[in-house]
Image: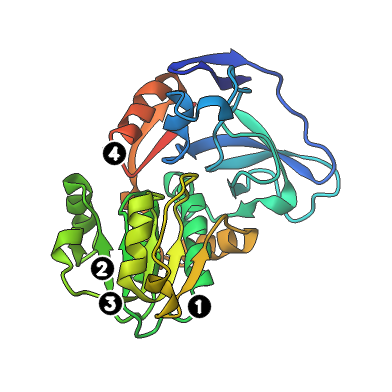
Amino acid sequence: MKALQIIKPKIFKIVEVSKPKPKKGEVLIKLEYTAICNQNDYKIFYGLYGNLFKYPCAPGVYGHEGVGTVVEKGSAVKLLKIRDRVVMTIEGGPMLYMEYVTRKAAGVVKISKNVPAQEAAVLELFSCARHCVKLLGDLKDKKIAVIGLGPAGLAICRLLSLQKTGGLTGIEIDEKRIRNANKMGIKRVLKPAALKNDKFSVVIDTTGSPEAMKYSFELAQKEVMFFGFTDKKFEVNPAQWFEKELVIRNSRRQSLSDLKEVVKLAEQGKLKVKDFVSGVFSFEDYDKAVALVYKKSAVKVLLRW
């Protein structure tokens, strides 16, 4: 079967690897679509992680957001059937840039075929966003700011729009992303300079930028949530959080229950995600797809064989 392999920065190949066989408790899944990770793919492909990644990468790296169809079952698999469509994450099996992958049956979520496969492919992102929102608890009447309106920020805003809050403000510096956020239904989007005396109960940073993370402490009155990650050190004046008794949280990764919740919302028609799919490329055009993400010219880009 075919698999994508990154040989070295900016060089990839489509290689032949052995088709896996599902073991006990596993299913074999034929990939329909996988979504490029906006945070990791371009950094790996362009060599921006330095020594953190060794090349050549293993075939299949770094696909971890996808949807596919069950084509074979190992023993002891009872809840899934052949031809069931399932949504996958990074858990329970190899990376997804392959024609076929195995997954533990208990680690995937069946999804109705009434949800188009392209839309199902981006639900892994929403499960991460759902985990973040769930950690914040009851947001009724709370003013919320989301810093950074890339895919993660947009997904968090979309989920917040399903709740009753005291108001939602998106904060972004990139003009292209501001226009896109308005187009995608976020009514109040401002640059930092336009905020003036605005204060928010909860501030969610999705950028992972030290500057934005520091800014979160200025804006927040009750709680700061870090969805974005940085390995860079930055300093914060303790008075910015001590006097306000700020709660400081971070959201690391989704759980299977988060994925089940967003799948249910999509099946019920409550969660609309069609506008998150900006384009579909073949794996042979992986470099072009990554370039689109790197230039911030897309929300989510899908790959297919």
Residue on which the image places disc 2: 169
Q: Which mark is residue 167?
A: 3
Residues at marks 1 and 3, CA–CA distance in whole angstroms: 16 Å
Q: Earlier in the sequence, mark 2 or mark 4?
A: 2
For label 3, count other residues whose C-alpha is less than 10 Å away and answer few (under 14), some (14-19) or many (20+): some
Give the left or right position of residue 194, taking residue 249 as reference.
left
Q: Residue at x 34, y 70 (%)?
A: 161
Which badge, 2 or 1, comes first in the chain's sequence?
Answer: 1
Choose between 245 and 75: the one closer to the eye.
245
- Residue 170 as seen in the image, left or right of residue 125: left
Distance in Å between CA atoms under marks 1 and 4? 31 Å
Dot 3 falls on a residue whose secondary structure is loop
Query: Tag 1: residue type?
Result: Gly
Q: Inspect this view and state whether residue 158 appears.
A: no
Which three-letter amino acid code belongs to the residue tagged 4? Answer: Lys
Q: Using residue 198 as the reference point, say whether residue 278 is left or right of it.
A: right
Provide the residue designation for mark 4: 296
Q: Quadrant of the N terminus?
A: top right
Say whether disc 1 or disc 4 marks the residue closer to the N-terminus: 1
Between the C-alphas of marks 2 and 3, the distance is 7 Å
Under circle 4, the secondary element is loop
Residue at the disc numbered 1: 137
Report helix, strand or loop for mark 1.
Answer: loop
- Between residues 262 and 223, which one lies in front from this camera angle? 223
Q: CA distance from mark 2 to mark 4?
A: 21 Å
Asked if the residue at tag 4 contacts the one at tag 2, i.e. Cβ–Cβ closer than 8 Å, the answer is: no
Q: Are marks 1 and 4 in contact (CB under 8 Å)?
A: no
Specify the quadrant of the image occupied by residue 186.
Answer: bottom left
